[in-house]
Image (spheres, grey):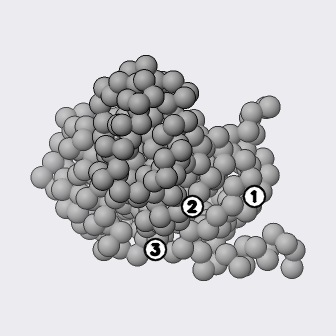
Amino acid sequence: MGERDSVESASQDKAITVSGITREFGLATAVDRISFEVDRGEFFGFLGPNGAGKTTLIRMLTTLLKPTSGQAIVSGYDVAEHPSQVRRRIGVVPQAMTSDLDLTGRENMDIYGRFYGIRSAERKERTDELLEMVGLAQRADDLVATYSGGMRRRLEIARVLVHRPALLFLDEPTIGLDPQSRRVVWELLKKLIRSDTITIFLTTHYMEEAEMLCGRVAIIDAGKIIAMGSPPELKAGIPGNDIVTLRVGGLTDDITAAIGKLPFVHKVNREEDSVSASVEGGAQNLPGLIDIVRASGGTILSASVHEQSLEDVFIHYTGKSIREEEAKKVSFLVGAGMPRRLGG
């Protein structure tokens, strides 16, 4: 038995096993020797800024892009050696909306089921069940062109569940949705992971989304995993239990250095006219921080205290923040949402 066969055999009890996977585009490396495992039934997330390599990774795991090197086993099969078997066992919701606007919700579901060779009676039963689950039963026979963005996203999640996949991939599933629609999708996903024997793999740049949904999170930056664990574990792994952010008039390096010397301050990061400090007991020690800024010649413009978040974990490891960029304008018609024919 070769090394590749040994890895594949050892990965049968895992939903995903990735070993040193890399993807290069010319001289640029989008994903750089990443390794991780995902247990069956787990809700696992990749959190990172736009351009960090999340979509490239998910395209490799869903057989749309071949790795430059390394290996990925998905649902027991090597993505490069057995792509058809992988596709039979997964559902993929890409960033782009891919439901057909000129068809009804029910027709979109039916066509997807036909791609997987599901018999008519089972397709109908499964479609009715899923449309009810996502709250679209009353709109099933309306054209998708009349759906809101949130309704379309719920339809697309329902659609990829028609063939009962063992593993669901979600690439930035709530990008471009308004806050209310985003929360509706979150509740649907929480309900799904509780009620079905399915593994969910999510990519996102929304910290709240990762923290609310994922049992474990891998934080990715510049194509590399920089930290991995449950949200509480990741937050517990950085010093201080609070973050104090001060916007300072006349902020200088000397003021930043003075803050860093205080005994209750663990780490300081400066961005333009603001300084953020990881501290013990933020509320109690805020007056001391304000005093040192004033004594050093600065003026306090605003101050805030919050508990550690996943963004603070990202800042701890990279020295920069994950900025909540404006939602990308994605095509409603182009994407990887419909499966390839299973013989391909």
Q: How many labels does the image show?
A: 3
- Spatial CA span between label 1 and label 3: 23 Å
- Sequence order check: which comes first, mark 1 or mark 3? 1
First reached walking from the N terminus: tag 1 or tag 2: 1
Image-quadrant location for residue 212:
bottom left
Q: 251 and 313: which one is in front?
A: 251
User: Is mark 3 in CB contact (under 8 Å) with mark 2?
Assistant: no
Q: Residue 41 carries which label?
A: 3
Q: Would you name the residue on which mark 2 appears?
A: 228
Side of 189 relative to 76 (left or right): left
- Say what amino acid the circle numbered 1 marks: Gly
In the picture as drawn, the residue positioned furthest to the left comes out as 138
Locate the N terminus by quadrant.
bottom right
Q: Which residue is drawn at 30% across and 53% down?
A: 284
In the displayed structure, does residue 41 sit left or right of residue 253? left
Name above or below for residue 262 compared with residue 176. below
Residue 188 visible in the displayed image: yes
Few, some or many residues within 10 Å of mark 1 (<14, 14–19, 20+)? some
Q: How crowded is mark 2: few (under 14 residues within 10 Å), some or many (20 or more)?
A: some
Q: How crowded is mark 3: few (under 14 residues within 10 Å), some or many (20 or more)?
A: some
Residue receiving disc 1: 20
Where residue 343 appears, as percent x and y from the top left, is 62, 57
Q: At numbered mark 2, what does the secondary structure look like: helix, strand or loop?
A: strand
Badge 3 amino acid: Gly
Distance between the alpha carbons at the discs numbered 1 and 2: 16 Å
Give the alpha-carbon distance from disc 3 to disc 2, as whole Å: 18 Å
Is residue 98 in view from this perspective?
A: no
- Residue 178 vs residue 226: left or right? left
Picture residue at 33% right of the left edge, 45% below the top: 286
Please identify, in this view, whether the residue under mark 1 or under mark 2 is nearer the observer. Answer: 2
